[in-house]
Amino acid sequence: MLVLLVGWVAAIHPAAAQHDTTHRQALINEIRTSLHKDVLTVWYPRAVDTEYGGYLSNFAHDWTAMPDQDKMIVTQARHVWTTAKAAAFLPEQRDEYLAIAAHGVDFLRDKMWDDAYGGFYSLVTRAGDRKKGNDPFTQGKTAYGNTFALYALAAYHAASGDPAALNFARRTFQWMDAHMHDDEYGGYFQFVERDGTPLKEGWEPHPAKDQNSSIHILEAFTELYTIWPDEHLRDRLAEMLILVRDTITTDPGTLQLFFHADWTPISYRDSTEAARQANYNMDHVSYGHDVETAFLMLEAAHALGLDPALTLAAGKRMVDHALAYGWDDEVGGIYDGGYYLDPNAPPMLINNGKTWWAQAEMLNTMLLMAQHFPNDERGYYNRFETMWRYIQKYLVDPEHAGWYWGGIDQEPDYKTAPKGSIWKASYHDGRALMNVVHLLEDAP
C-alpha cells in the first residue's frame, strides 16, 4: 500500500526541488540509519519471546526486560506488522524479519484467538493464558484490538505470500463484521461480550463508538483490501472513509473523540469546569490523531480508486488546524492536546506534552503534504525537516538508543521512563521512518 500511495502522490503533485540531490540523499541515509539503530535493532530480536512465543512488551529506559510481561493484542499485532513491513523494506534482511513476524502470527493464532467464540482476546499472560476480569479488556473483546490483528495478518500475507495468513485475516474481518458492525447507524461498536454480543451502549464509562478504533479500522481495511479486493470489504472500507471524513471529523478540522451509537458526539463543553477537566480524556483536540487521520484517509481513498480531491481537502484542513494551534514554533514538535471551550475562539492548550507517536505521525504527514502542496505558504517541507531535527534532539536516546515516551524538552523525566510497554512498541516510529524514506526516494 505504501509504495502505491507514494506513486500516486508523485503523479499528482510532483515534489518541488526543496533541496539538491546531495542533501536529499544525505537525509535519506540519516533516516535509514536511525530506523536501523533506534527502532529495528533495539526491538528485534530483543522483544522476541523465545520461551512462550509472541513478543515481550515491557522494557526499562536502558532496554532491560521488566518482570511484568502480560501481552496485549494491539502490541503483539503491531510487532507483526512492523516486522512484516521491515521484511519488504529491507530485502537483504527479508528472511530475518519474516521469521520474527511469523513467530508473532503463531502466537496470535495459538494463544490470542478465541477458539470457542472467535475473535481475539485483548489481554493474556506472558504464557498466553486469558486474563479474566470485569472490564472490557479482560471480559470482552474490542474492535480496536481485533482490527490491529487484522492489520498485522494482512501485512504478513503481503510480505510472505502465506495463504494461511490471508485466510486468517479474512476470517477476522468476517467475525468483526458479523459481531461488531452497526447495521443501523454504520461503523463498528468498540465493545462486545466474549461471545460477540455487541454492547450498544458501550461499557461504562466508555461510550459505544470512538474515533481511535474507527481510524484504525479504516487503516486495517485499507491494508486488507489491497490484497483481497472483496466487494463487501470495499463497501465497508468506503463506509468507514465517509464516516471518518464527514462525521467524526468536525469543524474547524478536528476529530470528535467519542460517540453514542447513533454518532451523537460526547461533549462536556457546556458542563462545569470540574466536569470538563475530569473528562478531558474524552473530549479534547488530539493533534496527533488529526494529522495521522489525514494520512490514513488518503491511503483509503487511494485504495478505493477515488478522486482524492474531497479527502485531500479534508485532510489538509486537519493538518493546517494542527499547525495553527498545536505546533511549537520555538523548537518544533506537535503538542498533545487542546480544547475548544468557545467554538468561536482559538482552542486552549491543555496538554503541552509531545508524545512519541504524535511526533512520528507529524513527520510522515508533513512530508506527504509537502509533496501534495509544495508551494503552500505553511511550508510543509520545512516543517518536516524541523520535525526530524526535533525527533533527533528530543526523542531519540543518544545513550541507550530508541525513542523516549515523549519529547524531553517538555518532560525531561522521560529520559528514565520505560522504552516499551503494552502501549508503546515499534509501530508509529517504524512506520513513519519507512514511509518518509519511500517518499524521499520516489520524489522527482
Image (cartoon, rainbow, N blue to C red):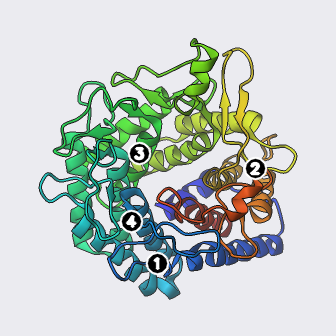
Q: Quadrant of the C terminus?
A: bottom right
How many discs appear? 4
Question: Is 373 in front, or is 406?
Answer: 406
Per the model, the C-alpha gap separating discs 1 and 3 is 23 Å
Of labels 1 and 2, the one closer to you = 2
Secondary structure state at the residue bearing disc 2 = loop
Q: CB under 8 Å between callouts 1 and 2?
A: no
Whole-angstrom CA distance, mark 1 to mark 2, is 30 Å
Q: Which residue is mark 4?
A: 155
Q: Choose top left, top right, bottom left or bottom right for residue 260.
A: top left
Q: Is residue 444 visible?
A: no
Q: In front: mark 3 or mark 2?
A: 2
How crowded pointer 2 is (Cα within 10 Å; few <14, some 14-19, many 20+) is rated as: many
Who's the residue at 14% across and 51% down the image? Answer: 117
Dot 1 or dot 2: first in sequence order is: 1
Q: Secondary structure at mark 4?
A: helix
Q: Which residue is tagged 3?
A: 218
Q: Residue 333, which numbered label?
A: 2
Name which residue type carries label 3: Leu
What mark, if any, has residue 87 been given in the picture?
1
x, y (%) of residue 170? 23, 57
Q: Secondary structure at mark 1?
A: helix
- Few, some or many residues within 10 Å of mark 1 (<14, 14–19, 20+): many
